Image (cartoon, rainbow, N blue to C red):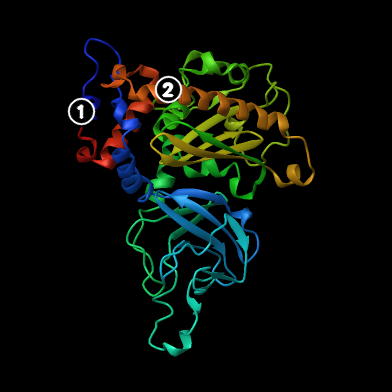
Amino acid sequence: MIIDQLDTPVSGTSLKPTPAGAAYTDPEIFRREQAEIFEKMWNAVLRAESLASPGQWRTVTVGREEIIVVRTRKAGIKAYLNVCRHRGMRVCTTPEGRSKTLQCGYHAWTYALEGELVAAPNLTSMPDVDRGEYGLKTVHVREWLGYIWLCVSGPAQGLDAGPGAPPSFEETVMAEVSTRFGEVQSLENYGIEGLRVGETRRYEVAANWKLIIENFMECYHCATIHPELTEVIPEFAQGWASQAKDEIHGASFGAQVQGFTVDGSAGVAALPAIAPEQDRKYYAITVRPQVFINTVPDHVIFHRMYPVSAEKTIVECDWLFLPEVIDGQLDVSRSVELFHRVNLQDFEACEQTQPNMSSRAYDDGGALVPSEHHIAEFHQWWAEQIGPSATRR
């Protein structure tokens, strides 16, 4: 089995084993990951400010489901499976739009923004049709940190029943934040919900989503491929990420560094509520299964990951600043450029790794050094989620 070796250290060394290469290439394992991880957990999908006005909607993908996310007139943000209840065509066939209703282009079944069926050809001659029962099927929605989080767990339901129970947001998403920051309040000091998007970059990465998470969780590679980052955060050159084991640790800026920018020069206005111990420090957290959050004194970098196939992943990254920075059109390019370069460097490494997941040299997997302890914990979590039956060769 692919994950058998996770329980046994490599004999005679301080190394720990990884999953076998097939874990990163097998379509059946990827299908199981979509079903057991992404479709059962909370996924951050959009900045709430991107749907500013009633009628604005966008389509997003969670696992194997395409979802309409819309700001309604009466009920705030709502989300629906993008499936017409008549014959199953997609209701929204473009990535975004603004409209008073949501209408399928096949037979003109029309839905209110709140989801119920409001019109269809000859609908008045069918008085027995329950317009709530044949409304769009809802998806769980939660707003936090200024983002819209979705969960498609449980059977999709009509408007009359409501969706099945999702996992507790507090016991999953917020609990992960607590393990990294000690308490949720420490993250809330950054006021992420009140920040504005300075820039968004979208990356198409030819690599398995797990390779991207593994890369983000360690800094053993930092001295090799991140010269700009290690100039700003010198301790990263030692091979330990800011997720130091069994402690809440922020990585310190270099003594001569003024800000988290590509050249170490001063950034923009500092976030007003950060604690003294958060000044001149970088923190990073992985919120499983698909969010990375990086915090520095004057901005926050928020990644969202969308697995497309076993060998392709879309990553969207927002750089968030105070509203007065955005409204004043202050130059944030040096702040954006630093982590954009880090992203490009990381994703190239992942893309150079992905082809060798199919090599016979990686049939039994690879090895982790002690500073990669977080990756070993991630592998164990992954194995627990998808179950041993999914990893049998």
Residue drawn at (47%, 57%) of the image: 67
Residue drawn at (35%, 24%) of the image: 357
Rendered view: 222 above or below 124: above
Quarter of the image for the N terminus: give it.
top left
Name the residue type under label 2.
Answer: Thr
Identify which residue, 140 or 271, lies in the foreground: 140
Q: Where does the image place residue 208, in percent across and percent down from the top left?
A: 41, 33
Q: Is residue 108 left or right of residue 4?
A: right
Q: Is residue 104 left or right of residue 378?
A: right
Query: Which mark is nearer the camera, 2 or 1?
Result: 2
Residue drawn at (29%, 40%) of the image: 28
How far apart are labels 2 and 1 at the CA level?
Answer: 22 Å
Secondary element at tag 1: helix
Give the mark nearest the N terminus, 2 or 1: 1
**Residue lying furthest right in this view?**
328
Name the residue type under label 1.
Answer: Asp
Quarter of the image for the C terminus: give it.
top left
Q: Where does the image place residue 242, in percent across and percent down from the top left?
A: 49, 25
Secondary element at tag 2: helix
Q: Which residue is mark 2?
A: 353
Q: Which mark is residue 4?
A: 1
Q: Where does the image place residue 268, in percent across and percent down from the top left?
A: 73, 34
Rendered view: 391 above or below 132: above
Q: Where does the image place residue 56, in percent across and percent down from the top left?
A: 62, 62
